[in-house]
Image: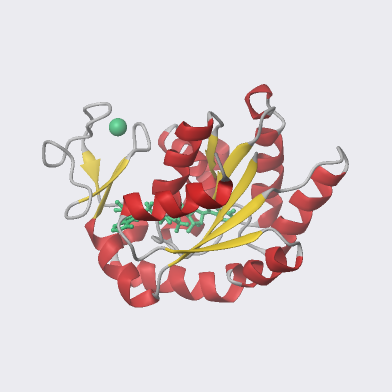
Amino acid sequence: MKIIMLGAPGAGKGTQAKKIAAKYGIPHISTGDIFRANIKNGTELGLKAKSYMDAGGLVPDEITIGMLLDRIHQADCENGYVLDGFPRTIPQAESLTEALKKNGESIDFAVNVDVPDENIISRMSGRRACLNCGATYHIVYNAPKKEGVCDACGQELVLREDDKPKTVKKRLDVYHDQTQPLIDYYKKEGVLAEVDGTKDMEEVFQNIAAILGA
Ligand code: AP5
Ligand code: ZN
C-alpha cells in the first residue's frame, strides 16, 4: 500500500505515519527526518538543506525530488510505504505521479490530517524531538517517561530550531501557499481521504485505519 500523509506542519503527520508503518509493516519515509539526519551527520545534502529549514522555507525541489525518488526505489519499499512530508509542492506531486506511472503504479491513499492553524502553534511549542532516532513527544499530550529523555534511545530531547513560534508562522504561510493545493490535486486523482486531526492521537489513528482497511 502506498500512502501519502498531507497536513500542515504539526498536524500530526509524523505521529500517524509511524503508527501506520508499524501496523502495515511498510517503511515510514519522512523527508524532514532524512534532512535532519543529514544535517546531524554534516553531509553536503544536510549543509544545503539547513538554511532553508531553519528559516521555515522549503528545500528546493531539485534537491528533494531526486532524494525521495531514490529512497522509494530501495528494496524495502517493494510492498509500499507511507510518505510523510512529501510531496509538498505541485511539481513534487507531479514527479511522483510520473515516476510511479512508469511502473504502472499509483498512490492508494492521500490522507489529509486536518488541524486549524490556531491549534498548531501550541502543538509545536510543546513538541520535543529526538534528533538521534527521530522519535517525537509532546510535553502534555505525549510526554516521555523521563522529562527531556527519549524513551526509545535514551538521548536528550530538544525543541526543534524550526519549532520556535516565529518560524512556525512562516512554515504555516508556506504550507497554505505551496502545499495546501495538493489537497485538490489528490482529490482529482480520486485518492483523497480526510480525517479530523484535532481528536486525540489514538482516535485519529482509528479513523485512518478504518479508511485504509484491515
Ligand atoms: P518536516 O519534518 O516534514 O516538518 P512538518 O511537515 O512541518 O511536519 P512536522 O514534523 O513539524 O509535524 P507533523 O505533522 O509530523 O506533526 P507531529 O506528528 O510531529 O519538515 C521540516 C522541514 O524540512 C520543512 O519545513 C522543510 O524546510 C523541509 N522539508 C521537508 N520535506 C520537504 C519537502 N518535501 N520539500 C521541501 N522541503 C521539505 O506532531 C506535532 C506535535 O503534536 C507533536 O509534539 C505530537 O506529539 C503532537 N500531536 C500529534 N498528534 C496529536 C493529537 N492528535 N493531539 C495532540 N497532540 C498531537
Ligand atoms: Zn531517540
Residue 138: percent from the left, percent from the top?
A: 23, 51
Which picture quadrant has residue 27?
Answer: top right
Image-based side of 193 in relation to 165, left or right = right
Q: Residue 48, can we see it? A: no
Relative to 117, is 150 above or below? above
Quadrant in which ligand 2 is drawn: top left
Residue at left offset 42%, top offset 58%:
54
Quadrant the C terminus occupies: top right
Residue 97: percent from the left, percent from the top?
A: 78, 52
What colouring does the structure picture have? secondary structure
Please name whichever residue, 135 or 50, is drawn nearer the observer in this view of the structure: 135
Image-based side of 110 in relation to 51, left or right = right
Residue 136: percent from the left, percent from the top?
A: 31, 44
Please name whichever residue, 23 or 140, is drawn nearer the observer in this view of the structure: 23
Residue at left offset 65%, top offset 30%:
77
Relative to 156, is 202 above or below? below
Image-based side of 105 in relation to 78, left or right = right
Please name whichever residue, 86 or 7, is drawn nearer the observer in this view of the structure: 7
Residue at left offset 71%, top offset 52%:
62
Which picture quadrant has residue 76?
Answer: top right
Please name whichever residue, 108 or 158, is drawn nearer the observer in this view of the structure: 108
Quadrant the N terminus occupies: top right
Image-based side of 109 in relation to 19, left or right = right
Residue at left offset 33%, top offset 77%:
118
Q: Residue 192, can we see it? A: yes
